Image: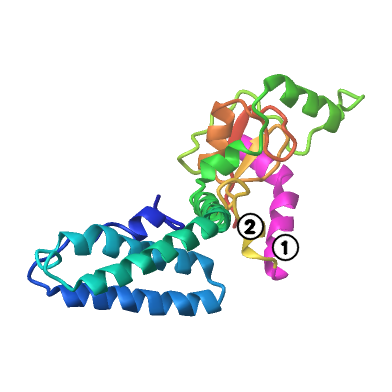
Amino acid sequence: MSWGINIREATRKIEVDHRIPLKFYYKTADNLLKQANIYRQENNIIDLYILLLRYAGIIAETIPFHRDYSASNHTEKISYKKKLLDVLRELECLRPQVEREINKVNREHALKEQIRLNNASSSRQSPHSRMASLWPDNKQTRHSRLTLTIPRPANPEVVPSAPPIENLIIDDDAPLQSGSAESSFVDSSSSTTENLSKRQDEGSSNAASSCIICYEAPIEGACVPCGHMAGCMSCLNEIKAKSWGCPVCRTKIELVLRLYAV
C-alpha cells in the first residue's frame, strides 16, 4: 500500500544490537510511554495505539534477547512486565476503534488518489480522443441522430450551403489553380470567408478560429457538400476517411476542400 496508514510497517520489530547498552533500550521504552500519554490526552488514538505497540515490541521482543538481560536487575524486570500487561490491556480496548479510524483514513487517501489519477488522465486526453467523443460509437444511433436533427429539403432544387463540385479533382496539399471551377467555388463561398474575417476583426477569441476537433490548428478546410468550415485539413480528412460525417451537421463528407483567405 503506497498511501494511508500501515500499522505493521509503523511497528516493525526492533532488532537487538549488543553494542548498545541495555539501559538505553529501557530508556527508549520509557520515552515511548511518555509520548503515548501525550497522545492519550489529545485523544489521538491512532498514534497512541502505534506507540503502545512499539513499547510492547521493545519490552517483549527486543530487550529479553540482549546479552545483558539475564544479569539485569530482577526488580526492574518485574516493573516493566507489569507495565507491559497494562499496555496490552489498553491495546485490546483500543483495537476496534483504531481499526475503524484507520479504515476511514485509508478510504479518504484512496479517494484523493483516484481523483488525482482521473484529473491526470483527463489532462493527457489526446485530440483524437476528443474527436471520437463527438460521434456515437453505434452507427444506428448516428443515423437516428441525423434523421432527427437534420431536416432534408422538400425541394430537390435547393442549393446546399456550399455548392456541389462535380468532375473536379483537387489536391488537398497544393493551392487551387486558377480556372473556372476555382472561381465559381471561391465566389460562392466568399460570404462565408468574409463572415469569418469579420468575426476575427471584431476581436473574437482564438477558439472561434481554431479547429473544433483538436483546438490547436487553424480552420483551413470546408466540408463538401454542406460547406461547413469546422476544422483543419488533418482532422477533416481523418473524419472523411472514417465516414463520420461533418462535425457540425453530420452530413456525409464527399470532399474536404482547402480554403485560402486573402
| Amino acid at the residue labelled 1 | Arg
Q: SS for tag 1?
A: helix
Question: Which residue has dot 2 on it?
Answer: 209
Q: Is there any visible trace of residue 144 in the rendered image?
A: yes
Residue at horizontal 25%, vertical 69%? 77
In front here: 161 or 14? 14
Q: For the residues labelled 1 and 2, say whether their Cβ atoms are less than 8 Å apart.
A: yes
Q: Is there any visible trace of residue 176 in the rendered image?
A: no
139 relative position to 168: left or right: right
The percent coordinates of residue 36 (x first, y second) are 43, 74
Q: Tell me if mark 1 has few (under 14), some (14-19) or many (20+) residues whose alpha carbon lies within 10 angstroms of its own.
A: few
Question: What are the residue bounds of the magenta stretch?
Answer: 179-203
The image quadrant that residue 235 belongs to is: top right
Chief secondary structure of the magenta span?
helix
Looking at the rendered structure, which numbered label has been put on residue 199? Answer: 1
Figure check: 212 above or below 170:
below
The image quadrant that residue 144 belongs to is: top right
In front here: 4 or 71? 71
The percent coordinates of residue 228 (x first, y second) are 70, 42
In front here: 177 or 120? 120
Q: SS for tag 2?
A: helix
Figure check: 58 above or below 36:
above
Figure check: 79 above or below 165:
below
- Asked if residue 184 is among those painted magenta in the image, a careful observer would answer yes
The percent coordinates of residue 150 (x first, y second) are 83, 31
3 relative position to 144: left or right: left
- Of callouts 1 and 2, which one flags the residue occurring earlier in the amino acid sequence? 1
Quadrant where the C terminus lies? bottom right
| Amino acid at the residue labelled 2 | Ser
Residue at horizontal 51%, vertical 54%? 113
